[in-house]
Image (cartoon, rainbow, N blue to C red):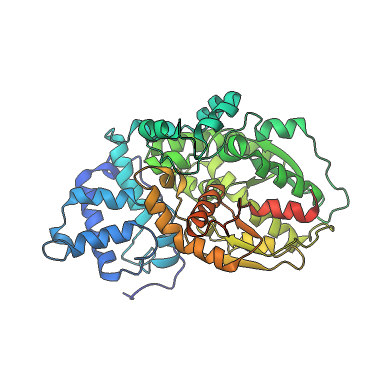
Amino acid sequence: MREGSLDAPTRHPIDWQDPAFYDSDAIDAELRRVFDICHGCRRCFNLCDSFPRLFELIDESETGELDSVDSRDFKAVVDACTLCDMCFMTKCPYVPPHEFNLDFPHLMLRYRAAAFKRGERSFVDRQFAETDRNGKLAGPIDGLVNWATRRGNKLSRPVLETVAHVHRDAEVPRFHGKTFEKRDRAEPVEVNPNAPAKGRKVVLYATCFTNYNNPEIGMKARNVLARNGVETRVLHRGCCGMPKLENGDLEAVAEQARTVAAAFRPLIEDEGYDVVALIPSCALMLKFEWPLILPDNEDVKMLSEATFDLSEYVVDIARKEGLADGMKPLDGDVTIHLACHARAQNMGPKGAEMLRLIPDTKVQVIERCSGHGGKWGMMKEHFETALKVGRNTARAALRNGASYTVSECPLAADHLVQVMEREDAEKAPERAFHPIELIARSYGI
């Protein structure tokens, strides 16, 4: 046995269809095994709030060891986990293939799955996870919805906080009735026939967020790819299931995986399309989480192997064929926050690599958590913690003083700006960008 491992981390399939997966005694025994190892190591103390909560429980217990911590107190540790995977990917020396076999995020997922099966997930959490339904309902009345959810609305935000437990000061996504799919159909784009990458074909997985909350990301991605000779199609068959994964609703995630993967298979198998996911969390689901949930599903396997993160795909073009001419320097430097779910894809800092393709532009990288964690950071019980976790990231961005602040995760981008406002309102940017928006700006599109 070695103290730590130099091998690449590997993950086991999630055995969610086995009744033993949900056994409370077995889960408690595994929590105690893993937490005791974490207590003896503590390398992960500064990643998120789960580990400080765990270590505080132990340090303040009667014996100062895990044996005197009540299992009922473990829920606070589980609730603080955002499933960012950074402990598994970057910190823990005991992940598989090490014989200690630690996978902290998937253990938190198992705890939540058992709680979900017992009916312990709140009504609000379950409704927030219905992202496609919510987008379709909000779209036709987007003006009213966006007014009611606007930060600073003293009439409606206290009500939203009471009813839905969303903190009244948290930035929340806007909705668009004119979705990415609708805009793509209404605004045809011409593919550059002289680009070095002419002949590539991509189906853009719109994702719930891009489709309903930020269609501009999709439009910029489509237009940049077209400038580089890539034929694009847009498909949104349904959500990737990340919000339901966070709830522990594994059966619903599996159903989404089957449905979406089946819709993509003919485009991949019969027509030769690559698949590009526009949001890192969704790319992570398609590439890694779905194959662990449905390891024997051939549609899921094919989709996983064909999927690229957006930044990853643009960098792949640059390396293999070269980008189309026409990019010009930006009017200032760039600071990019590398999203946790981009880092968890184990593909390298592709967002930063992509931005460095812009001529004569300095790109500075921040590899720290923004503190957002999906809807987690918006909720009343977590919002102040989310601000605290993101403080060092915000301070680093402010110190850099770049003209553009960027994150691959749009939710993290908005949250990061909010933390920067709290730190120094005068120096905080009005908004943060997605990396593809700056590539499009460099091209003048």
Q: Residue at x 62, y 46 (%)?
A: 278
Q: Position of residue 151 (x, y in %)?
A: 50, 40
Is residue 376 or residue 208 the one in the foreground?
A: 376
Residue 421: where, in percent of width, then height? 52, 54
Classify residue 356 as left or right of residue 213: right
Place residue 159 in its image quadrant: top left
Q: Position of residue 158 (x, y in %)?
A: 40, 34
What residue lies at 43% left-to-right and 54% top-to-bottom?
387
| Up/down of 11 relative to 188, above or below | below
Q: Nearer the viewer, residue 145 or 427?
A: 427
Q: How many marks?
A: 0
Q: Nearer the viewer, residue 393 or 282?
A: 393
On the question of residue 38 being in view, the answer is yes
Can residue 229 be spotted in the picture? Answer: no
Q: Quadrant of residue 68?
A: bottom left
> In the rendered view, would you say 29 is above or below 294?
below
Residue lying farthest to the bottom in this orientation: 2
Q: Residue furthest right?
A: 194
Whole-percent x and y of residue 44? Answer: 36, 66
Left or right, 68 with reference to 399: left
